[in-house]
Every structure is written in C-alpha cells, then in structure tokens.
Amino acid sequence: MNIPINEMKEVLNKLFLKYNFSKDKAKFIAKVYAENTLDGVNSHGINRVPLFIEYVKKGVVNVDAEAEKAASFGLIERWDGHLGPGIINATKCTNRAIELAKINGMGMVALRNTNHWMRGGTYGWQAADAGCISILFTNTQPNMPAWGGKHSRIGNNPFIVSIPRKEGHVVLDMAISQFAFGKINDYKLHKKKLPFPGGWNEDDELSNDPEQITKTERGLPIGYWKGSALSMVLDMLVTLLSAGDSTFKIGQKPTESGISQVYICIDPDVFGDGNLREKLLDEIIDYTHDVEPMHPGEHTYYPGERTLQTRAKNLKEGIPVSEEIWGKVLDLLEIK
Amino acid sequence: MNIPINEMKEVLNKLFLKYNFSKDKAKFIAKVYAENTLDGVNSHGINRVPLFIEYVKKGVVNVDAEAEKAASFGLIERWDGHLGPGIINATKCTNRAIELAKINGMGMVALRNTNHWMRGGTYGWQAADAGCISILFTNTQPNMPAWGGKHSRIGNNPFIVSIPRKEGHVVLDMAISQFAFGKINDYKLHKKKLPFPGGWNEDDELSNDPEQITKTERGLPIGYWKGSALSMVLDMLVTLLSAGDSTFKIGQKPTESGISQVYICIDPDVFGDGNLREKLLDEIIDYTHDVEPMHPGEHTYYPGERTLQTRAKNLKEGIPVSEEIWGKVLDLLEIK
C-alpha cells in the first residue's frame, strides 16, 4: 500500500504524542521517520517505529531527555545524550557541528549515551542542506565477527560522508556490513539468495543463504579483513572522543542503548570558491556516471542520487509501505 | 635475501644523492623507503624505488620542489605540492596538521599537486607518534570500475586512520580495492588464485584469477557498490578541499602525478583524560583479540599490530628483499 507523506507524518505525530513526547518533539520525530521512509529507507523509517515505541515503553529511550554539552575545547565538544531519543540527539549534535564549522571552518561533536539515530544519512543531508561537508559515524551493538574470530564482537558502525552540491547533494550512507540485517531478512522473506556472501553459516563458512546467516547473526564486513579493521577504528574513535560506551560495553546491555557517535562538519566555503567546487564535483560525477555498463542494463550512480529519485517518486505516488507494518502502527495508536 | 635496515638506508641515501636530492632530503627519503620495507610493505618500500627513480629521471617528480601553503583559514590550510617528492610533501603536511591540532584541538591540511606518498600508513604512524589521531586519504589514478560501469574510472584511494596508544598505536592503512595490484601480481608470480574475487576478467565476470585481473586492470572495490561509493566521496573531498586534480584529471596524464590528499589531525588530549583513553582502547582490543578463532589456527589482530611484529622481526633478522629488486637498486647506483 502507498501512504502520502503528510498522512504518515500526522499518524506518527499522534502516536508519539500518545507516548508522551512533547508537542515539538513528537512532530519532529514523526517528520524524520516519515522522511526516512519517503527516501526509501523503510528499515529505519516506518518499519522501525514499533520497536522504537517498545523501547520507549521499556524506558530504554528516555522520552524527555536531550543531549547536553559535557565539555568543550574550542571547536571540539563532548555531549551527553542522557539516553534520549537518538533522532533528537543526532539532529541537535549535527546542528552544533554545523555551527562550529561555520565559525571555525571545521567543528566536531562527540556524543555519548545516545540511542539509535535511525538513518545516519538523515544527518548527512541535514549538514549538506546547511552547506557543510559532514563526516559522521556511530558504533552499534556487536553484529559481525572481527576477522579471524568466531563470534560477533564488532558493530556494523554506519559511516556517513556528505558533500553539498547545487544539483543534488552527494551523500554516502554506508554500514560496514556487506548487507544490513533488514535487507538479509527481506531476502529470507522472499526465499531468495543474497547476490554475494553476507555472513557466516553454522559451519563457519561464508554464505549467501539469508536463512543461515540470520540463524547465526554473524554478518560479513565489507572487504572481509578490511571492513573488520575499519569497524574497529570507528568504534575506537567514537568511544575515546566521547568518553562513551564501546561496542564491547553496548553488547553487555539487554538492548542496544547508550551508543557513541562523532559528528565532524567542514565549511567548504572558507576559501570562497564555490563555483570551482561545483565544477570539480560535476567533473567527477560526469566521468563515472554516463559510462558503458559492465552488463547490459546496469547503471552507475553517485552516492545519494537514487535517494533523490526515490524521494521524488514517493512524493508523487505516496510511500510504499508493508500493510502489516502500517497495521501495527495504527494498532499502537488504536485507531484501526 | 635479508638486508639490515642500516645498510638499506645507506644504499638508498647514496642513490638519492646521485639523483640530485639535497643531503637532507636524500637521507630522509631513504629512511622512509627503508622503514616502509622494514614494516613489511615492500611494495611501497624498496620494490618501488626503481619506479621512483624513473619518475625522477622523467621529471614527473620534481626533485627540488616542496609543498608550500597556498591559502589558510584558521585551522584549515591548503597547500600546493609543486609536484615534489610525495614522501617529503606528505611528511610536511602531516607535521603541519599535527601543529594545527596541537594549537586548536583539530587541524586539516589539503594538499594538491603532489606525488605518490608510498605507504599512507607512514604518516598515520607519524601522527600517532606525535600523540595525534589522524584521518588521512589520497586519490590515485583510475584503477577500478565504478559499480555498474565497465571501465576503470575510480581510484583505490588509500584511507588511513591512526590512534595513539602507549602499548602500540592503532593504525588502519587501507586502500579501497580488495587487493593491491602489487599483491595480485605476487599471486600471479606464485601461480596461485586469490582467496576471494579481486577484480573483473575479460568476460566482465568477477574473478580470483590474478592472470585475468592484471590483463584487464579492473580491480574490485571492497564491499562492491559500497567501496565504489566510498572511493568516489574520498576523491571528491581531496579534490574540492585542495582545489586539486581528481582521479578523472589524473587519468588523463601519461603517468600518475599531481594527486590530491587530505590530512586531518585531532589532539585527543584536549579533555585531559589520557588514562581513560588507554583503558577504553584496551577494552576494545581485549574484547576482539583473544577470542575463539573462526577456523583452527586463525587469529584476530587490531589494525597496526602485525606491523609492529614485522618491524621487530626484521630489525633483528634483517629485511627480506627480493634479490632481483635489490640488484636493480644496486644497478641504479652502479656499485654492483
């Protein structure tokens, strides 16, 4: 079924009001969940709302809490999320990193004790809309084995880079796992194999069988040993810069909570050559874009390009949503 | 054959003096090439010296040139490498980013018109030795297809993250290609298959046959479409921040030259909690380190750990070097 963006925003707004979010916060969180879904990221949009409400009910997400500055050194700040909603905390810290960048050319906020920010790309788009380059990353609960080890001990630690551009921002939003577990579940649901190995089976072999991977919950890092190492250093950076919890500590909790994140923003306008920048970006995009495909029918895209296409389509036609999920959301609201 | 580090330094010093490097620069470049080899990175150590000398002879590398500041905005600086030796330029820009970080907490140098820095990790170790976190990246000539495209149009753009640590720095030194072309050539030489697909064959299929991959020179990005996107944004960042040449422009030159790089340093001591930092790092390392192996005999390592092991071994036993390569170097010096 397809839901118009405004209907989704209204329903979610009511839902969050019911669960005791303030008027402003309910409206804002509803907007972000709806826009994540509008952009095609249902897994961190509407599909995730029931789990978010469960976390609110359990007190994992502290409805009233909000990130506060804990320490600062010029353009580097440390914030404490007080286990508030990840979306509110992430938006606030991105805004602060943008402010620091507008003043100093560059700024960094390290955030501890926060909750899942849903789609990391959201904050990349936010920074780019404000004219800033952003480099953002987070840790997560353990969900992949470190290379050579048997059990999941590193996180898929999403890594975001965004670059403002007049004809459409460039936004890379990439978890360090080869496939998101949400995606692996989709393949399982449709009884399809993954196109490439995505994790380990019970015999400790790499597998493209979603059934087997979800059984062991051992995802595969991108680039095997390389992604494993990248995941580790991202966890180290967010942990030591925020003085927060690492993937190790998060894994000891009953649910994923109290995670650590870093927000770096750079103002590319400090040298006053915005026109040159647009030209250089367009050259890179043109060179990689309209090229002979590897196989008939394939296309190359720049990071963020397909998001804009999906956004435009869903604005026009409504957002494709699973009937079951939408039913769950309405049930939570008790208006079905 | 095994060459003691000091002998390698002396020979290389003489060689660079012969090719008109100043006394200081010859000594310094010799030290870096020897230490890269000491750390086991022969491909960007001794093995690369003959090609470097060829570039010097051709005037691709400008022996006397050195990076100079071209523009600055507080803690962000733009430098021009004037096509000088990549090692000299990279060392200078890393030092400058460290200085900016020591003053401001964080600093960034964007460098254009430079040459190959050899082992990117060298500058990660340099920053960590100075007590700084570093995030460093470079573009390269095109050597991988962008995902979906047929021809090589993105670079393997090495990405370095280093974190200072008392018991051994953490240093990630990772090209965005699944395998370095040097490594693929090693497999070819030994008539072995790669353990995982590493590029495309002439039939546009992913292949682990080094023979076929070197024929097409189309490497595979880590994580398929993910590494392809990461390579693109790294190229965009180095290009627009330095106002330098992109992979597109580098690919139009007869040899790889005039590349662009970014050096970000962060002083983790700004919050004065070095002891906590060591503890948090050790927790992450312990959690991922001495774990049940995926397969018998496998081990997990933190990024940089094996470099330290190799360094210690080669200091003691001499540096393993291909006789053919060492012969070539001595031939260049005409002392054989």
Image (cartoon, coloured by chain):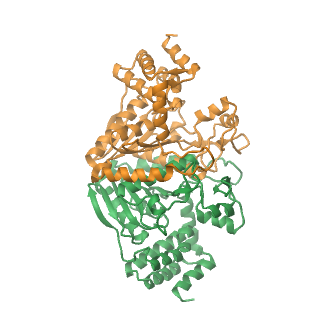
Chain colours: A orange, B green
> Is residue A53 among what the camera can see?
yes
Is residue A53 positioned above or below A246 on the image?
Answer: above
Q: Residue B4: image x %, image y %?
A: 55, 78
Q: Residue at the location (42% across, 16% down)?
A: A14
Residue sitting at the far top? A335
Q: Residue B245: image x %, image y %?
A: 41, 60
Apparent side of residue B107 relative to residue A148 in the rendered image (left or right): left
Q: Residue at the location (34% across, 22% down)?
A: A24
How many numbered circles are shown? 0
Apparent side of residue B105 relative to residue A18 in the rendered image (left or right): left
Q: Residue at the location (51% across, 37% down)?
A: A250
Q: Residue B242: image x %, image y %?
A: 36, 58
Is residue B89 positioned above or below B138 on the image?
Answer: below
Quarter occupied by the N terminus of chain A: top right
> Is residue B285 among what the camera can see?
no
Q: Residue A287: image x %, image y %?
A: 48, 53
Q: Residue at the location (45% across, 36% down)?
A: A308
Apparent side of residue A75 relative to residue B144 in the rendered image (left or right): left
Quick one: B332 or A278, which is closer to the camera?
A278
Residue sitting at the far right? A203
Is residue B328 positioned above or below A297 on the image?
Answer: below
Is residue B129 positioned above or below B56 on the image?
Answer: above
Apparent side of residue A150 relative to residue B90 in the rendered image (left or right): right
